[in-house]
Image (cartoon, rainbow, N blue to C red):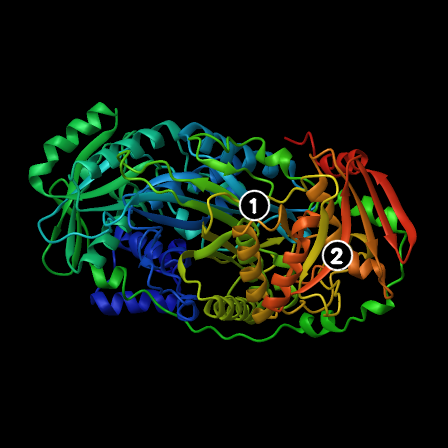
Amino acid sequence: MERAYELYGLKSEEYEKIAQRLQREPNLVELGILGALWSEHCSYKSSRVHLRKLPTKASWVVQGPGENAGVVELDQQVWLAFKVESHNHPSYVEPFHGSATGVGGIIRDVLSMGARPIALVDSLRFGLPPDLRILRGVVRGISHYGNCVGIPTVAGETYFEECYRTNPLVNAFCLGILPAGRMLRARGKPGNLLFLLGSATGRDGIHGAVMASAEFGEDRQEKLPNVQVGDPYFGKKLIEAVLQAVEEGLVEGLQDLGAAGLAGSASEVASKSGCGVELWLHRVALREQGMEPFEILLSESQERMLLILQEDKVERLKELARYYHLEGQVVGMLTEGDTFRAYMGEELVAELPVSLIVQEAPVYEKPYAEPEYIKTLRDFDQRALPEKDLRESIHKLLASPNVASKRWIYRQYDHQVGTNTVLKPGGDAAVLRVKWVVKPELRSDKLIALTCEGNGRMVFLNPYEGGKYIVAEALRNLACVGAKPLGITDCLNFGNPDRPEVMWQLVKAIEGIAHACEFFQVPVVSGNVSLYNETVERQELRNIYPTPVVVAVGVLTGKSPMDHQFKERGDMVFLLGDLKRERSVAGSEYLKVIHGKVLGDVPAVDLEKEKRLHGLLLELIEQRLIKSAHDVSVGGLLLCLLESLFDTDLGLELNFFVEDRLDFFLFSESPTQVVVSTDKERAQALRERAQAWGVDWLLIGRVREEGLFTLTNNGETLFESSVAELQELWESPLRGLL
């Protein structure tokens, strides 16, 4: 058994702890179980101590972190379940199946709460230039699974940076709805049976949790068997079968079979239930011959759920399985005590304390230290930057992959299946209606908003301020459509935590996110941590940017949402927010694309001013004092204005009076800025409400009928172009790649 533990991702001191606890050496099956459940992916052993800093409670939170998904109250009729999770490593090894099973897995996490999944969101990172094998495979995998299973992908974001070339990020989010008071957890009591429902079990995905907890070298192809293979048609049947079982009152709890397969799900159910568990592996339906106990326990074959039920419900559940053409069989039971036992026929193949598998997984407080690069990058004086030709800068930015339209990606997704989508992808946030949950009388007239943010470049420059920055932007996006936040879920994508500089990035980013969430009183109700996003290739070490991704869920305060597009000729265009601060181009797309630099300190968010801006926006939208609202973000003010024009057949006449550098004013990505439009009759009321809220305002232009974009500063026309020409530049950079 010498050093066999390394094959299962365990360290020598972890193996010694196991042997001492058992007073014997574990067998290979037990070692595989512990290796999977003690992996970073399952145990969060490097991050757990810091995740406790995140605020998780509020009066409307029904279920916070610790279950398959978080649950919040929408109203007295409907609750919302949601979570985001990563599938980064599998998507690098096998992009299509890696991304598809990421979608399938997060759907089942939400289903595990007894909720019907109704919406998907994806956050993607690719290399620059992109590896087309990875780019095409990931987008096709997401679209294949979501489209086939009939759940719309309604929002998302995509960034391109050199650091993601060998570590693409694929984060998938799902939101589901359930009747208030009918939430299920992964819990039961001794005597309950465990019913495995769904697809047959194969050899795919074994060691998937271990693979997700290790850095990559040049052995990518050797890891192909670790990647799961999904089937969205089975996924759809499983959703309907589980929801019918829930509606009929057949189950007491649910657990997805994800990381570590049956071993992981059964041990987690036992741990949460405070009891032991027996598994009868010979009863598991297999799709491959000759599978060993180790393979049956740790297979991560997709489209499988563990249902917790009483014995008198088994026959009806078998009938449902046959009706939906799914495999269904009792494969174990919860027992008194604290022991996990797995049998293959009469043979006992594994016997471990449940507490050792789950609660006693190691927790590390790893050392961390500020990286040397921080001081170097912050030594930046933007005033020394040479001024560039304005037309050339605008054209280059529009063609930048991070600024350019992502329509070429989201057009692959069916974002209207289910007919709940009110605001489609392409704006600040998607908006959904809730038509019904289980029965037509169980409905809500509330509208739900979803948005996704994760600017890794800003977090790279200053993890703490970057963490605040992305939370503020996500909540600002909700405010732009007229929504108040209910909660967020986060996916923390970082490099190797054994490196003190990476651990420092993780700690500071969590603290920044926690600070912002506490200030805004927005709970973090679920999430995921993805570490070891690092590759050693040709003796070169490549870490990703520290990339925490935040998905914010909100509820609209009014009956209809606000969108980002200008509406009518003659409308006045205002800039609202924190406008008296210095315009910083640190970390901006302008600084990188035009000047070839990633430098500076993150423009710090003034959280009090940010909060006042959100309050003002919600009031303006509720009272219908504005016609559009759009957050200033990647690309800066000028790109925000152009995005508000595209697809409208309108034009815009801008009149600035900027004495300092105009390029900084136009392309800064400083936070707390929103562009709104309104007509002349309501403009005065807008100014008065902005003043009452203590929010700066600036009239910057008027919408014109003809499709012409004109920019004037201090009376001099500096730029003029047709909107159609600019939109073509914005649409075309990566069009056709898919």
Which is more toward the observer, 176 or 412?
176
> Residue 699, labelled with which disc?
2
Tell me the quadrant of the picture where the N terminus can be found: bottom left
Quarter of the figure that contains the C terminus: top right
Give residue 139's mark: none
Instruction: Please tell me which residue lies in front, 438 or 102.
Output: 438
Question: Which quarter of the picture shows residue 696?
Answer: bottom right
Q: How many numbered callouts?
A: 2
Residue 57 vertical position relative to residue 417 in the rendered view, above or below: below
Q: Secondary structure at mark 2?
A: strand
Query: Which residue occupies 38% across, 64% down?
Result: 56
Q: Position of residue 669 (x, y in %)?
A: 70, 59
Q: Which mark is residue 562?
A: 1
Whether residue 489 is visible:
no
Quarter where residue 344 is shown: top left
Place of residue 63 in the rendered image (x, y in percent of width and height, measured from the top left): 31, 57
Pick the front one: 468 or 6 = 468
